[in-house]
Amino acid sequence: MKYKFVEELLLSAFKRAKNSGNKFYDIKERNIVKLQTIYQYIDDKLEKMYKDIILPENKFYKELYKLLFTDIDIKKLRERIKYIRKIIKQVYLKYKNDIKLTKDKKIIEKYRREFYGRISSILRRNWIVFKYYNIYLNRRRKIPNIKNLPTVVISGLPNVGKSTLLKNLTGSNVKIEPYPFTTKDLMIGYIKTPYFDIQVIDTPGILDRPIEEMNEIEKKSILALNYLANLVIYIFDLTETCGYSIEEQKNLLNMIKKIFDKEIILYFSKKDLFTEREERILNEFIKNYNNMIIFYDYNKLKEFLISYIKNKKEWYI
């Protein structure tokens, strides 16, 4: 039913008005209070709707909004709600004034009924606005709530140790946020320092497969992460206990390099499981990837992140 939201709004407003003003003996005052009750209730709801619709400011959210709201002009929707508020206020002030200027009881009742009818008509004519508002709210729930902080994104194939590194860097207080167009969530933790907080994001099931396997909308949602990250950590599991070969892990690293135009730090997990084989491969990596920053101790990685970001004041001031 296209009017369902509108009818529920009107029903609630009229119910509130039914008993309001009854304490006034004067019919004029009684009906003005009824009008005021209806107007205030509806205006409060419209004001909340207007404030609910957020226009994104940073590039990351702008990109996600483009993908999520291809069929809705968010700015126009917000302006339309503002316009409806304006019209309803004008109608309210008109009928409030009309009632004030007459002494005829029948005309006062007539004005009140007309006001009810005008308000109902305005809201019903704009039913599509309320439909799109509800669509907007439902889709917006899929957008992660990410703070405006220096941000490090952790990437790598499944089971290489991304969630373990996140907990080691940030502690156990990790929050979960949805990410649109995927069935997975972002895991977010924070490194606290006296100068700033660092936001660390693990992307399980998101940045862990070749981009060729993604559909167009998935690719775009992944590319949006580039606007979020200040630094990227790519995790290698040289023990291959994750179920992926070193070659497969290198291939994903090459894809990550194409997506992110940011500094990529290599982190080698599961160092406690290294044998002579893994130590030899690690030394080869250090030699072959000498243009990249490499860590296998999470404490030293954490120290580096704090020191590095401390010198990037434009990221947090």
Image: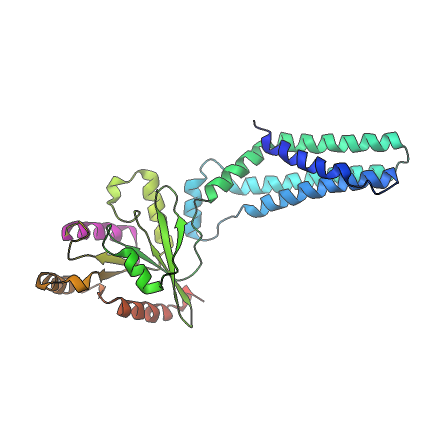
Q: Name the one closer to the observer, 253 or 169.
A: 169
Residue 310 in the image: above or below residue 71:
below
Locate residue 217: give its quadrant. Answer: top left
Give the residue at x 32% y 51%: 203
Asked whether, in this view, residue 49 is left or right of residue 16, the answer is left
Which quarter shows the N terminus? top right
Q: Residue furthest right?
A: 103
SS majority, magenta: helix
Residue 143 x, y percent position in the rendering? 43, 47
Q: Is residue 6 visible?
A: yes
Residue 68 x, y percent position in the rendering? 43, 41
Asked whether, in this view, residue 118 is left or right of residue 159, the answer is right
Based on the picture, tell me whether residue 190 belongs to the magenta stretch.
no
Residue 197 in the image: above or below residue 252:
below
Locate residue 311: give its quadrant. Answer: bottom left
Asked whether, in this view, residue 15 is left or right of residue 4, the answer is right
Tally of numbered tags: 0
Q: How is the image coloured?
A: rainbow
Q: Is residue 97 visible?
A: no
Q: Which residues are magenta?
A: 246-263
Q: Name the one closer to the observer, 174 or 309.
A: 174
Locate residue 220: give its quadrant. Answer: top left
Q: Residue furthest top?
A: 1
Give the residue at x 40% y 70%: 193
Residue 114 x, y percent position in the rendering? 77, 30
Which quarter shows the C terminus? bottom left
Residue 70 x, y percent position in the rendering? 44, 37
